[in-house]
Amino acid sequence: MTDRPTTDRLTLADFHYDLPAELIAQHPPAHRGASRLLHLDTTGALHDRQFADLSGLVQAHDLLVFNDTRVIKARLRGHKASGGKVEVLVERILEDNRVLAHVRASKSPPATSKIRLADAFDVTVVGRQGDLYELAFPSPVLELLDAHGATPLPPYITHAADEDDDARYQTVYAREPGAVAAPTAGLHFDDAMMAALAARGAERAFVTLHVGAGTFLPVRGGDLATHVMHSERYTVPAETVDAIARARTAGGRVIAVGTTSVRALESAAAAVGAPGRVPARAHQADTQLFITPGYRFQVVDALVTNFHLPESTLMMLVSAFAGMEPIRRAYAHAVAQRYRFFSYGDAMLLEAPAA
């Protein structure tokens, strides 16, 4: 398997669709799970369903793999010693009191300079790593973010994060803090759905992939063949490796909940793969896996996902999984039927095409 299939004939236009702005969901539904579900089955047929129908589409011995990352309150505002305004978005926690962060300011803050954040504490600029700044916090990062930070909603959500967002832009099973964007397919799942899936005889397992702000970055220069994906840290634990093996032995499917679960599973399979399409052992690493049409999936048989931005790397991933033409039809159908799009929007169930 290769991490970069041939993309010479593909352009951004192949992953474009027209989306009316009013279909971009600005708020979650009143209740978790009260979303619609567009089901693309193995034959390429489309079915309009409700998310509550998902449990009836899952079979005994299927394994659902969830990303248990927890969104941190990564956005902070402040000012430099000169008084100039600064916005900080923590991208990755390096140590207890050090981070890599995006810093927006009229002028780049130099190394050793101080930034006052939330009128509460100072951070020190240690240096730069590419487009990111290394910042030293005066005490544990997570404690300061919890006390003074804001939930980092995506750029297409136009309101400032409030208490409702703090709760709803987080999965019910989130437990490992480190993401700056939610694994949004998981936002539809509530305790009742988890219980219904278990009653069907399905198993659950978890990976951790700390979603970075790079998930919203466009393909630079429009050239898929030269695009370099942002790096994200992931973990596939031994318990999940064992659960995949059990599902395979029992004839069940591996159903990834979200594209981040796909990237974690497929990255582990590439790094420590074994016969039988399972990761050979637990694995933790950084991944820059860029999945485009032509990619050979090793682990995932079905995918629960939200609707993605036009021309985004996630559109390329779902097109690789379900096929470019079926995805074009599915998105055109979703627009025509007024589905809600993006993080707070409706969901899809994509089944791998029949061989």
Image (tube, rainbow, N blue to C red):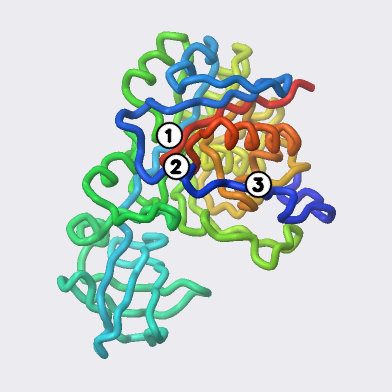
Q: Earlier in the sequence, mark 3 or mark 2?
A: 3
Which label lies toward us, 3 or 1?
Answer: 3
In the picture shown, does residue 71 fall above or below 280? below
Helix, strand or loop under label 1:
helix
Callout 1 touching callout 2 (CB < 8 Å): yes
Q: Residues within 10 Å of mark 2 (few under 14, many from 20)?
A: many
Q: Residues within 10 Å of mark 3 (few under 14, many from 20)?
A: some
- Which residue is pictured at 63% across the width and 48% down the height? 18
For label 3, the residue is 17
Query: Residue 243: image x %, image y %?
Result: 51, 23
Picture quadrant where residue 227 is located: bottom right
Query: Which of label 3 and label 2 is nearer to you?
Result: 3
Which numbered disc covers residue 183? 2
**Numbered disc total:** 3
Q: Could you say which is closer to the camera, residue 333 or residue 161? A: 333
Of the pair 240 and 226, the residue shown nearer to us? 226
For image coordinates 27% across by 57% down, the residue present is 150
CA distance for labels 1 and 2: 6 Å
Of helix, strand and loop, which one carries label 3?
Answer: loop
